[in-house]
Amino acid sequence: MDFSIPATTTELLRRVRRFLDEHLFPVEAELLALGFPAALPRLAALRAEVRAAGLWLPQMPATLGGLGLSLQEHGLVSEQLGQSPLGHYLFNCQAPDAGNMEILHKFGTPAQQQRFLAPLLAGEIRSCFSMTEPDSPGSNPTQLACQAVRDGDDYVINGRKWFTSGADGSAFAIVMAITAPEAEPHRRASMLLVPTDTPGFRVVRNIPIFGHAGADYDSHAEIAYEDCRVPAANLLGPAHAGFAIAQERLGPGRIHHCMRWLGICERALALLCRRAVARQLGPGEALADKQIVQVWAAESRAHIDAARLMVLRTAWLIDQQGFAAAREEVSLIKFHVAAVLAEVLERAIQVHGALGLTDDTVLAWFYTRERGARIYDGPDEVHKMVVARRIFHRYSKAGAP
Ligand SMILES: Cc1cc2nc3c(=O)[nH]c(=O)nc-3n(C[C@H](O)[C@H](O)[C@H](O)COP(=O)(O)OP(=O)(O)OC[C@H]3O[C@@H](n4cnc5c(N)ncnc54)[C@H](O)[C@@H]3O)c2cc1C
């Protein structure tokens, strides 16, 4: 295992950082206050600058116009971009599009790639991923109820989904629906490409989250699929292989999320420290002089650094041996980094006092948007169960320590 960062990656990280410092951070607060729909023209202009700077699509192979980075390298870029809520979006590596690009690249037919993947790569459209349902447990997707029934050359989809992130403004959804109800649980579902202007695709609402329904990319929709008919040619990958494809999507996706969360942690810790040294509680007495704040700063530093090593090691393992070899590690980092994120954000807000709750810093944005980190892509409890089962399995083998 070699964690030294190649000179080319260091140079890339420096360029990414310089772009953020020069182009994004100075306007970030203004853009966030505008909200996505109003900010879109300016975001598009910034995206054009990212392209011109040769930093577009860091997660994709060079043959598709990306930077062709390893997972470990992209993780480091993702950490930089995560320092702003707009970073990934500007570089066209935001969830869920990044995952959708990946599975379209791996499983899409040439016609699907031309119609759906090419404009995604170009940043001309956005997409969403529609799996979770209000009336079935997302943490056990074998229980999905939404069905896609074959009818001649079409599939007809009926069901209700929610938390389809960014559906508002998306050009198409990748929908996970049951196509073989009698098959064994992990061979029941398929993925289907559904243009959002298909009759029967209805956005019921953008779901208010902590009082904020949001719009466009910053939203999570409830969607009704009502006799929503798509050609069988819109099947993504083999029929009934939805779970296998979802696994492909989630492995790298969790590395991306974890490194993004570490970027948020770095930003939050920097804000904590700046505030702690600047805020005077009395004459000659800064907040940073208080032992509890010192403990928060020191512990946060340690927890972030340790978490980063865990994630980089997991990315390295996937790069070397594939996702299957890193299942336990992926679950470990998913719940661990989400906990570090929650802890560091909480402390940063506390150090800011009432200011921490306002939109005058980026902390409140992160706090409300990222509480979901402990729930999406598998709740903490499910990942802990996965890890614990593997640990106990090793102890149940004869001769285990
Ligand atoms: C911000 C955000 C964005 C999202 N974006 C998308 C998206 O784009 N597309 C999409 O399809 N979905 C999306 N989701 C949905 C997400 O994937 C689900 O919320 C998640 O899978 C959990 O499913 P659930 O909400 O139905 O919770 P449930 O399955 O009902 O679980 C509820 C709780 O039960 C507990 N629990 C569950 N299983 C176990 C267990 N085995 N042992 C112990 N406790 C357990 C956990 O505490 C869990 O939080 C998003 C969610 C959030 C919060």
Image: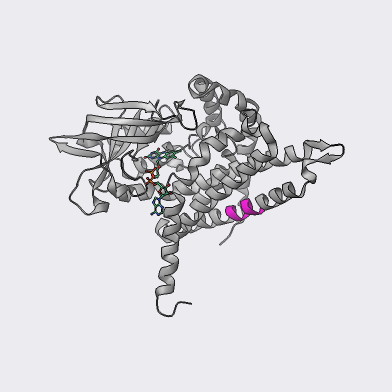
Q: Closest to the observer: 377 or 80? A: 377
Secondary structure predominantly adopted by residues drawn in magenta: helix
Q: Closest to the observer: 340 or 86? A: 340
Left or right of residue 166, residue 366 in this image: right
Q: Quadrant of ligand 1?
A: top left
State whether residue 321 appears in this view: no
- Where, by quadrant of the figure, is residue 77 drawn? top right
Residue 8's place in the image compared with 217, above or below, is below
Whether residue 103 is in magenta: the answer is: no
Q: Which residues are magenta?
A: 302-308
Left or right of residue 345, residue 108 in this image: left
Left or right of residue 345, residue 320 in this image: left
Residue 379's place in the image compared with 124, above or below, is below
Residue 159 percent across, percent down from the top left = 25, 35
Residue 54's place in the image compared with 305, above or below, is above
Residue 46 percent across, percent down from the top left = 55, 26
Quadrant, the N terminus: bottom right
- Where, by quadrant of the figure, is residue 144 drawn? top left
Colouring: one colour
| Residue located 23% across and 29% down the image | 226
State whether residue 281 appears in this view: yes
Number of numbered discs overlaid on the protein picture: 0
| Residue located 84% across and 37% down the image | 282
Residue 233 percent across, percent down from the top left = 22, 36
Q: Residue furthest bottom?
A: 399
Residue 391's place in the image compared with 37, above or below, is below
Q: Closest to the observer: 169 or 291? A: 291
Residue 3 percent across, percent down from the top left = 59, 57
